[in-house]
Image (cartoon, rainbow, N blue to C red):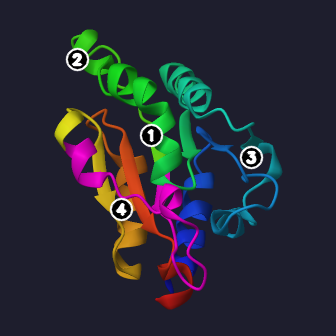
Amino acid sequence: MKYADELTKSMIYLSKDPRTIFLGQAVAYPGTAMTNTLKSIPKNKLYELPVAEEMQLGISNGLALNGHIPVSIFPRWNFLLLATNQLVSHLDKFSIMSKGKFKTKVIIRTSIGSQRPLHPQHQHIGDFTEAFKKVLRTVEIIRLEEPSDIFPSYKKAIERKDGKSTILVEYGDYYSEK
């Protein structure tokens, strides 16, 4: 299957879990390439949020603490940077601070922004994967390089029993190239 098709298949798979909630910008309404991967998701699972990234991840953290599995969508790494406090100081530390009593699971979708056919400028194409791997202790980051990586990685993210959250890094250019 193609890259975008694998993403769509993965989102449908995630949506079948009654604990999942999809939230972010361009989730319920068009706006990014990621929107197209959510067209088959039941509307009652899609929560459109304003551009307030720290609030979004804070809401995701709260939902996870209450037993939901938020699929929190940040269309670019550059946008996820704005939620760094919630990611590094909270989501990554819940299990450490609680001595394992709180094992929250948030699935974070982000992307290295596409550069083709139109370069959106440098504030939209960042890849901060390696930097965040050095900072995060309990959140796993997985780059989705090939279409064959996508479904197994999202399946792992939702089925994992270790109480870890997962950031899945997509490549915007691959939606139309692979």
Write the residue at 56% across / 38% down. 70
The label shown at residue 46 is: 3
Label located before the other in sequence (3 or 4): 3
Helix, strand or loop status at disc 1: helix
Please say if the residues under marks 1 and 3 sit with CB atoms less than 8 Å apart: no
User: For the magenta stretch, what is the residue range?
Assistant: 109-133
Q: How far apart are marks 1 and 3 (CA)?
A: 22 Å
Instruction: Find disc 2 in the rendering and name its residue.
Output: 96
Label located before the other in sequence (2 or 3): 3
Q: Which amino acid, mark 3?
A: Leu
Q: Which amino acid, mark 2?
A: Ile
Label located before the other in sequence (2 or 4): 2
- As drawn, 123 above or below 115: above
Residue 103 place in picture, x, y as percent: 34, 25
Q: Which amino acid, mark 4?
A: Ser
Q: How far apart are marks 4 and 1 (CA)?
A: 22 Å
- Horizontally, residue 93 falls left or right of residue 87, namely left
Residue 46 place in picture, x, y as percent: 74, 46
